[in-house]
Image (cartoon, grey):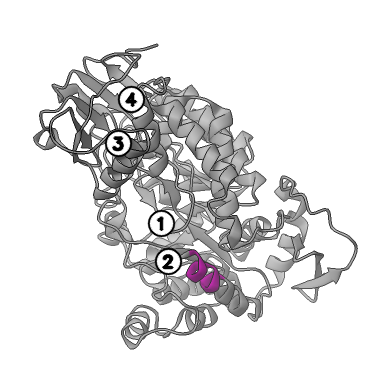
Amino acid sequence: MAIAGVVVVGLVIGGVWVVTRDESPVDPAPSAAPSSADAAPSARAIASKLDDVDLVGQMLMPFVYGDDSDEVTDSTRQLNLARTGAGTPSEIISKYRLGGVILVRRASDDPTAPTNPASNVGSPAQVRRFTDGLRKTAAELPAGVPLMIGVDQEHGTVTRIRDGVTRLPTAMAFGAADDPALTEQAAAASGSELAALGIDVDFAPDADVIGGPGNTVIGSRSFGADPAAVGRHVAASVRGYRSAGVATALKHFPGHGHTDVDSHEAIPVLGQDRSSLDAQDLAPFTAGIDAGSQIVMSGHLDVQAIDPGTPASLSHKVLTDLLRGELGFTGMVVTDGLDMKALTDKYSAGEVAVRAVLAGNDLLLLPPDVSGAQQALLGALKSGRLPRERAVDAVTRILTVKLASRPEAPGLDSLRSPDHLQAVDRAAAAAVTVLKGKCSGALVRGPVTITGGSSEAREFLTSALSRVGVQIGAGGDSIHLTGYLDTAADLRPASVTVATDTPYLLASAKSPTLVATYGNVESSMTALANVLVGKAKAPGKSPVPVTGLPRSACS
């Protein structure tokens, strides 16, 4: 692993991963990470010698309150004490010998908000300072292995880090553009910036094939409704992130797209027969695995065709027999958040932790009670309910991800670089879709009014229109933006209605011109402005069917 101009070499000495320095010259050009199989022997040698408490700690990735590893407010200290019995993030890592920590941002426009206790991310400088401090603490633990720091940076509605970074439109935008090269370039840009922030795992991309408009918890997080197309973009995303040294987690296995139930609140039931599951849901996961994804996230889903009545995240038949046995996945399996109401209403934190590992999960994400999960796993090891070899296998897979070689991480000055912004701009422009209306020339005449959508989207669009010479004000055409969770009641009479999230609502809009951007970030609004004034075409095609409308009116 190249760090700060030296080569870091790992040796196993007395069961501990020891870092040594090789002062030979390093090629500064980053390259794709080699196969994680290269790290597997060292990972197993370390895991097999860990004490039980260190073995268990490596399997836990909780949330911690605070935006600094050691300095926290009194109120934050009390929250941590109540949740974990330790006051600061560093003290929590030390107390439980943790192998990982997840970074979280709580926001009202996020479908995963119910399970995000608070935010521990802010500016890029704060995030990097925080991750550096967490890693310094972990390096002093007896296991002597790196800390895994993860985040849900899917972009769109699930974007944890928003300030000072290059923001991408939703996955559905990339499905609309349907150019895997653009997807890979944008993922590489995002991955490079996560690496600069000290993050090595992105719990993305979403490999779910969306089944319809009722699935709002997945919605625009999916690349679309066609399994083959979703697979193309999942694979491209994996390649992009891997090139930047960031591991990806395909989610939510075996597929959360064909249900209208939110697994944060209840266990969705997947009623497809096995042939439909294979054809509609599993194919994108296979594509992501073949592209080199090191991680798969298990979903809290009742898969009737395989193990009815048992959540997939707790099912040996789904995770061990299907994922590992049939699909041949050898990497790390992580649970979806164990703090979801669908699980906490039925199981204690300790019981769900043990069941999850026995089913085939390696890493336990967001245990609601870290102490309860730790003690239950230690007790299961002692009693033999959880065989030590199973725990060693789990930690071996975790360490294999951690110890895989990666390119040297860039500095914070690489955030929002021209190359990154241009990669995203190209994708956003390729996504814009006209589902009804003219395909050339200006679609609006100024001055224009803008209603609906998020305040941020309106600000971005206002600035973008101003740059292309369109004044904002009464007297001309009107533009209405629809956003996440909008319904027909949110529609307004307008010259143009624009879907900035999923496009389904356009079926109810009465505007003579209907457009979809599948994103409300700056790049999407800039691309929209260029189409509205006739400066650019709208080459995208809706990746999901919209009642009564074509995939595109222009192609």
| 374 to the left or right of 256 | right
Disc nearer the start of the sequence (1/4): 1
Q: Amino acid at mark 2?
A: Val
Location of residue 115 in the rendering, given as x and y in whole percent from the top left corner: 31, 60
How far is the residue under mark 4 from the one under mark 2? 38 Å
Quadrant of residue 538 within the rendered picture = top left
Residue name at image x 54 percent, y 82 percent? 94
Segment tinted magenta in the rendering: 124-131
To which residue does mark 2 refer?
121
To which residue does mark 4 refer?
533
How far is the residue under mark 4 from the one under mark 3? 18 Å
The answer to whether residue 214 is visible is yes
On-image quarter of the C terminus = top left
Q: Give the foreground label among 1 and 4.
A: 4
Q: Give the foreground label among 4 and 3.
A: 4
Disc nearer the start of the sequence (2/1): 2
Residue 155, placed above or below residue 144? above
To which residue does mark 3 refer?
500
Q: Which mark is residue 160?
A: 1
Label 1 Cα crowd, 10 Å radius (few <14 / some 14-19 / many 20+): many
Location of residue 364 in the rendering, given as x and y in whole percent from the top left corner: 47, 61
User: What element does badge 1 sit on?
Assistant: loop
Q: Amino acid at mark 1?
A: Arg
Disc nearer the start of the sequence (4/2): 2
Disc nearer the start of the sequence (3/2): 2
User: What element does badge 4 sit on?
Assistant: loop
Location of residue 110 in the rendering, given as x and y in whole percent from the top left corner: 30, 51
| 468 to the left or right of 279 | left
Q: Are marks 2 and 1 in contact (CB under 8 Å)?
A: yes
Residue 25, placed above or below residue 444? below
